[in-house]
Amino acid sequence: MTFEHGNGHQVPTPSGPVYVEIEGDGPPVLLVPGGPGVSHVHYHPWFSRLADRHTVVYYDHPGVGRSSREAGRGAYTLAAYAAAIESIRAHLGAATIALVGLSFGGLPAIEYTRTHPDRVRRLVLSNAPYSARTWQRGNIDNVNHEISTRYPELWDRLTALRERGVSSLADEYQEIVGVALPELEWADRLGHRELTRPSESVDRYNPDAYEAFLGPDPEWTVGGSLAGYDPAPPPDDLSVLIATGRHDRVTPVVVAHSLRRDLMPGARLVVFENSAHRPWAEEPDRYFAELSAFLG
């Protein structure tokens, strides 16, 4: 099957139509994208490795990428994102699905598993936070620590902006953070292969989703619809794989360990020693071998 990004279709959901692309054949595996506010584009062509044995389902969250924005800010909640997953499952005609929650995507994947436990065949959480507390610990506190110690010249500029009352959501603040992020997201920031970039404006980052989930000062405290999120443990008999990169400074490996300890003690935990936030791109051979064996 020849696969081309952009050859997808819209699936109705309670938050409006959601864009879906399908590759391969077999039991469905739904890739729950990261973000918030980022489309699925950069997962091409990496996850094609699963398409020989599975139906790989790529999609854009409500209000993001090629999905409709008709629901407005009301679509930017974990409940709405979980409802969209259920609509996609029903559209596929599948009794059960496997979920791969990537980074932020782990949160709607967990919420869907909580609300539709009988519909989840397997759950993979890849470099994923699982609560507002762990987002604060990794994506905010640890990132700020890393910037302040690795890039003190940038940290001085950020603190100067805050002293002027500039929110961390402001473009000038985000531009400075964006200089440091490649150091935190990759084990080898110079030697990694390039990710697929959005080629059309519709695929690009949506800051409205970022603000709605995380609030008006997202690099300092969790606000927005994610504030206070602390899910209950999933069913004990759910098969879960937790994947993390040893050098991830955005969602540090300690988050994966606490995820297994506090929420999913029966999960299998795999640490990729030569990866950071994207082991699927830095150690693809081992990553997809682990996923294929787990998904069955």
Image (spheres, grey):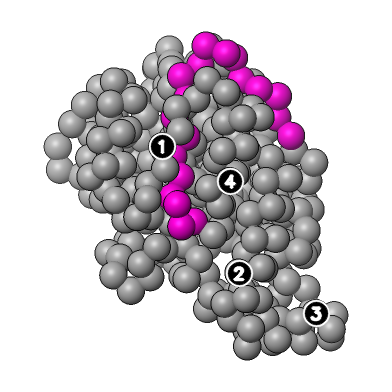
Q: Which tag, 4 or 3, sits closer to the chain's start?
A: 3
Quarter occupied by residue 168: bottom right
Residue 75 sits inside the magenta stretch: no
Image: magenta residue range:
230-248
Distance from disc 2 to disc 3, alpha carbons, whole Å, reads 18 Å
Q: Residue at x 50, y 25 (%)?
A: 267
Q: Which tag, 1 or 3, sits closer to the chain's start?
A: 3
Q: Is residue 131 left or right of residue 167?
A: left
Residue wearing tag 1: 270
For residue 146, which numbered disc appears in the image?
A: 2
Nearest the camera: 220 or 168?
220
Distance from disc 2 to disc 4, alpha carbons, whole Å, reads 15 Å
Q: Secondary structure at mark 3?
A: helix
Q: Residue at x 38, y 55 (%)?
A: 275
Q: Is residue 180 left or right of residue 58?
A: right
Q: Which tag, 4 or 1, sits closer to the chain's start?
A: 4
Residue wearing tag 3: 162
Q: Are marks 1 and 3 in contact (CB under 8 Å)?
A: no
Distance from disc 1 to disc 2, alpha carbons, whole Å, reads 24 Å
